[in-house]
Amino acid sequence: MLMPVTGSVIREYAKGRNDGIDIAATAGAPVKAAEAGTVAAITANADQVPIVVVKHANNVLTVYANVSDIAVKKDQTVSRGQTLGKVAAGDPAYVHFEVREGFESVDPLPYVR
C-alpha cells in the first residue's frame, strides 16, 4: 500500500486508543487511496470530522479521516494513488489513516512499508 499523504507519523498505532496512525501533512495536500478498491462509505465521526472508507480485496478496509473537499462518491471504484480529497486544515494539519482486517484495526505501518 501507499502512504495516503507525504509526511511524518505524529501519532502511532495503539489498539483501543488510536486505531490507526496520524500523519502530519500540509493542509490542502491530496489524500491518496493507499490501494485500489471501492469507496464503501463517506461519513463523519461524532465531532463531524469527515471520513472516507475504501474496501479492498481480502476483506481489508482503509479509513481516512480529517479529509476535506472529498472528490469521490460511495460505490465509486478508485485506483491506487487516486486522490480521495484534501488534508483538512488544522493545527497541526494531519490525516488519520487506519487499516482494518474485517472490523479489527491493525497497525497500518507494515502495510505501507
Image: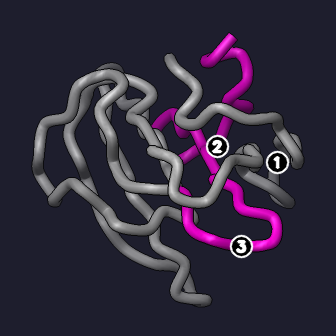
**Residue placed at 50% from the left, 17% from the top?**
1
Of the image marks 2 and 3, the number of the one nearer the N terminus: 3
Query: Residue 43 vs residue 89: left or right?
Result: left
Which residue was labeled with disc 3?
A: 90
Marks 1 & 3, CB-CB < 8 Å contact: no
Label 1 element class? loop
Quadrant position of residue 85: bottom left
Which residue was labeled with disc 1?
A: 15
Image coordinates of residue 15 in percent, x first then y, are: 82, 48
Crowding around mark 3 (Cα neighbors within 10 Å: few <14, some 14 to 19, many 20+) is few
**Residue placed at 39% from the left, 34% from the top?**
33
**Badge 2 amino acid:** Ser
Quadrant position of residue 107: top right
- Farthest-out residue, bottom: 47
Marks 1 & 2, CB-CB < 8 Å contact: yes
Of the image marks 1 and 3, the number of the one nearer the N terminus: 1
Query: Residue 14 vs residue 95: left or right?
Result: right
**Residue placed at 63% from the left, 18% from the top?**
112
